[in-house]
Amino acid sequence: MPKTQTKPIITNEAIQRLYGGVELDEVGILKPRCCDHCGHITKPRKETLSRGLVDSLKEMHAVIKRKGVNEFSYEGDVKWPYSRIANFQKLRYHGLAHHVKNRDGSIKAGYWLITKLGASFLRNERGVAKTVYVEENRIIAYGDDTVFISDFYSKEIYSEDYWQTNFSLPFEIDPPQRSLF
């Protein structure tokens, strides 16, 4: 299956159109802005997909594959240090993981699932934006750089077939209660 880019590229000009009044500094970083109504200051931040986050996604996949259910708890299924748990949630900014929801739509605390995009990313079929700009816990822009899982690992050790063979699941990855964002 050919690799595909999944996120639209948003340029600085598009950011200006979407978020009027947003100022960029000399290197294109979004500056803080102030709410006209309440005076609250928000500062956009850049979140970058790293090898550590991808390793966490791979470990999450191994647990889900072993359990046979697309549900993962970083408290019950693995023993991670706090720093890894704190960074793990950043996978959702890239669309690779999401909270599990209860039947009533509320979030099941501490439980995560792999999205369809996450499963495709693990099989090296789809790429994601390496950089995501977030403000107030919402994605406001994607960087220009698309990455695939194979970009984080040595091509001599991991062949193209490795990702297809080792990261397929024997069940449907997308439970009905899932919503991407």
Image (spheres, rainbow, N blue to C red):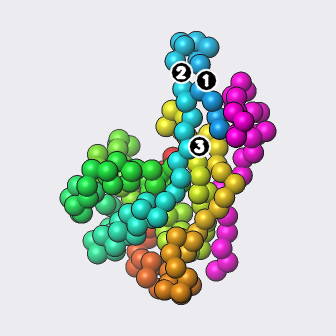
Residue wearing tag 3: 133
For badge 3, the amino acid type reads: Tyr
For badge 2, the amino acid type reads: Ile
For residue 169, what is the image quadrant?
bottom left
Residue 41 circle label: 2
**Residue at figure coordinates x 43%, y 82% from the top left:** 166
> Looking at the image, which is closer to me, 58 or 111?
58
Give the extent of the magenta segment: 1-28
Vertical order, 74 against 109 (above or below): below
Q: Picture coordinates of residue 65 (x, y %)?
A: 34, 74
Do tag 3 and tag 1 residues touch (Cβ < 8 Å)? no
**Residue at figure coordinates x 61%, y 57% from the top left:** 129
**Residue at figure coordinates x 39%, y 51% from the top left:** 87
Q: Residues within 10 Å of mark 1 (few under 14, many from 20)?
A: some
Q: Earlier in the sequence, mark 2 or mark 3?
A: 2
Residues under labels 3 and 1: Cα distance? 14 Å
Residues under labels 2 and 1: Cα distance? 6 Å
Vertical order, 177 against 150 (above or below): above
Q: Picture coordinates of residue 61 (x, y %)?
A: 38, 70
Vertical order, 165 against 138 (above or below): below
Residue wearing tag 1: 33
> Looking at the image, which is closer to me, 180 or 160?
160
For residue 60, what is the image quadrant?
bottom left
**Residue at figure coordinates x 57%, y 35% from the top left:** 44
Residue 6 visible (yes or no): no
Task: Assess whether residue 127 is covered by the magenta stretch.
Answer: no
Task: Assess whether residue 12 is covered by the magenta stretch.
Answer: yes
Q: Main secondary structure of the magenta part?
A: loop
Q: Residues within 10 Å of mark 3 (few under 14, many from 20)?
A: some
Do tag 2 and tag 1 residues touch (Cβ < 8 Å)? yes
